[in-house]
Every structure is written in C-alpha cells, then in structure tokens.
Image: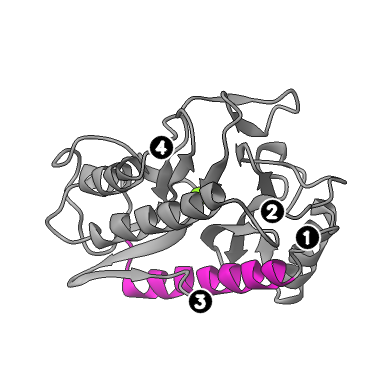
Amino acid sequence: MIILKSDLEIEKIRKSSQLAVKALEVVKEKISEGVTLKKLDKICYKFITQQGAIPAFLGYKGFPASICTSVNFEVVHGIPGNRRLVSGDIISIDLGVLLDGYYGDVAATFPVDHVSDLARRLLQTTEEALYKGIEACRVGNRLSDISYAIQSTAERYGFSVVREFVGHGIGRSMHEDPQVPNFGEPGKGVRLKPGMVLCLEPMVNAGGWETEVMDDGWTVITKDRSLSCHFEHTVAITKDGSEILTQS
Ligand code: MG
C-alpha cells in the first residue's frame, strides 16, 4: 500500500533528508587515498548522532554500520572495514537518517583522486540517469516512466542497470511501497500522485547487469567484476513536479 504524505510529513522527511545529505558531504570531505572505510563510517556515525538523529542503517536487519561503502565492482551494501582507498577507486556511500520518526535516504559515488575515463563516464551516466528519473516524477506519469527514463539513459551510453535491487517509497519506514525498479517499459504501474515520496536509486554497471552477494552475506558485487556506480535521492511528488528532498 502506498502511503501519501501530508505537507507536515513531507517537512519531516525533508529535515531527515537534509541531515542525510549533510552527513554525506561530511563523509565526502574525508574521501582520499589511504583512508579506511571504517574511519568514514565513524565520521558519519558521530555527525548524525551529534545532531540528535539516528543512523538508519546501523542495525537494520543486522547491518553493522551507519554507511554502506561499495568500492569498484561492489554494487551496494558493502560493509565498511579496514580496507584503505587507493587512487583510481570509485566509492559509493549510501546512508539513511531517522529523525523525529521519519527517514531520509541518499547515496552518491565518488572518485578517489584520478580515475579511469570509463569510471568517470560511469559516474556521469549514473547521475544523469537519476536526474532523468527525477524528471519523470510528475503527476499523471506512471511509476514505470521513472524506470524507463533511468534504464534508457544508462543503456544509451552502453551501460547496464541492476535488476535485483530497486528504489522504494519512504516515510515512517525506510522501505515502503512502491518498489521503484531501474528498468522497464514506460506507461505501466500506478499513476504518480502528490504526496508520494520515493527514493530513486539507479545502480549502473559498466558490464553486465547480473550481480551476486559475497560471503559476508551483504556486499553485492557485479558477476563479471565490472565497475558499478550508485546514486540516490529522496524525492517528493508535488502538484507541479517534484522536489528533491536530499538536494544539498
Ligand atoms: Mg534507498
């Protein structure tokens, strides 16, 4: 069931979303060669808790950290450990915040120093796919118009979109209906209405779309070990378009 949010509820999601994107910026500042993923996680935990909020990922289904750190061929859900970043890596940071009963969710992928042309194109394309999806967030469109906008953008550049993991509604729960796939034919699914709040989160691979999960039970990787990239915004559907609640 899709829960439509009142203006007051959207204001609360906006507050948690704004805190989430600020936390992402704090972590981004510390991304450099030599830093451990664990250190990035500690910085995020400290920032969110100092603001009186709760890191939403910590303890979620047993996840042991406040951020997901997914490097190179890792797609999503990487656990921040003792790995040190090196120049040429790309790292996706995904995090959520719970504040005053409502969630915000944001992710972005960053280059570490100098990355390959392929990596740079993958980052640009994934972010562009996210924004094309957001452009499709309009009253009267159907849910799969978002999916189609994302997929067609990624594939236009020769990349593929992950099928097994999708975007979602958000509000009093981190994952609400509807699921928002990053692939599909246009014109299908529910009609978009004001008050829907959706997390759009394309995961785009340089190679094939297939993924697998590592032995830690969390880290999703590309089956062909090609690079993967992930961007996410929390977006509210409004009467005359949409509002990116996690806009910095
Ligand atoms: Mg999400």
In the picture, the disc for residue 161 is 4
Q: Amino acid at mark 3?
A: Ser
Tell me the element at label 2. Answer: strand
Q: Is residue 104 magenta?
A: no
Q: Earlier in the sequence, mark 3 or mark 2?
A: 2
Tell me the element at label 3. Answer: loop
Q: CA distance from mark 4 to mark 1?
A: 27 Å
- Residue at which label 3 appears: 248
Residue 144 sits above or below residue 234 on the image: above
- The answer to which of 246 and 28 lies nearer the viewer is 28
Report whether the residue tagged 2 is closer than 8 Å to ligand 1.
no
- The answer to which of 82 and 152 lies nearer the viewer is 152
The magenta segment is 4-29
Q: Residue at x 69, y 53 (%)?
A: 67
- Residue 194 point in image, percent of width and height: 22, 64
Q: Nearer the viewer, mark 3 or mark 4?
A: 4
Residue 189 sits above or below residue 236 on the image: above
Tell me the element at label 1. Answer: helix
